[in-house]
Amino acid sequence: MNGDGLQVRRVRYDAMVAQALVAAALAELGERYGGDGDETPVSPADFEPPAGAFLVAYLSGDAVGCGGWRSHGDGGAVAELKRMYTAPAARGRGVARRVLAALEDSARGSGRTRMILECGSRQPEAIRLYTARGYQPIEHFGFYRDEPDVISLGRDL
């Protein structure tokens, strides 16, 4: 924990706290894009070490953000970022930056050398976060690769 009261901890993807944050994230994506928010198939097993991890950020004891990574491809070197979210009341306090850095550290610690992600053009704050962290456009790869709003980014860890 830092002096700002923010703590990031690994939790199971199917834990109640994780699922509550994921539900909020999907609801917000649904408001921006319609539908269920993100229909990319995920399984709790995707986020189990050493193939992945899911992290929750706590601010003064309250769960305020989350994110995960899962293995991508067959080579074992690439991690895919999924389910990044910060609760509206905690935005602007560095929660997403800290979660992203912790996810990158986790993936690197599990032997991953690259992180990739999909997001959409209606998420300018996410795009700013990722590009500020050094993510650059890559070839579309995921569930939404053929959608007009998709933005695919990656960076070496």
Image (spheres, rainbow, N blue to C red):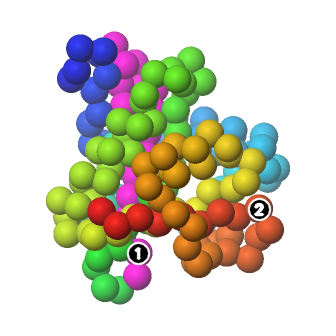
- The residue at the point 78 percent across, 44 percent down is 32
- The residue at the point 29 percent across, 76 percent down is 77
- Magenta-colored stretch includes residue 62: yes
Identified by mark 1, the residue type is His
Res. 151 in view? yes
Query: Dot 2: few (<14), some (14–19), or many (≥20) neighbours within 10 Å?
Result: some
Q: Which percent across, then down, holds residue 29?
A: 70, 45
Q: Nearer the viewer, mark 2 or mark 1?
A: 2
Quadrant of image for the N terminus: top left
Rendered position, 101 above or below 115: above
- Magenta-colored stretch includes residue 60: yes
Q: Which percent across, then down, holds residue 119?
A: 62, 57
The residue pinned by badge 2 equals 149
Location of residue 50 by image quarter: bottom left
In what element is the residue under mark 2? Answer: loop
Identified by mark 2, the residue type is Asp
Tell me: 22 left or right of 68: right
Res. 48 in view? no
| Magenta region, residue range | 57-73
In primary-sequence order, the first of circles 2 and 1 is: 1
Q: Which percent across, then down, holds residue 137?
A: 57, 67
In what element is the residue under mark 1? Answer: strand
Toward the viewer: 131 or 102?
Answer: 131
- The residue at the point 76 percent across, 70 percent down is 147
Quadrant of image for the C terminus: bottom left
The residue pinned by badge 1 equals 72
Q: CA distance from mark 2 to mark 1?
A: 22 Å
Kindly report the secondary structure that dominates the magenta region of the rendered protein: strand
- The residue at the point 32 percent across, 50 percent down is 103
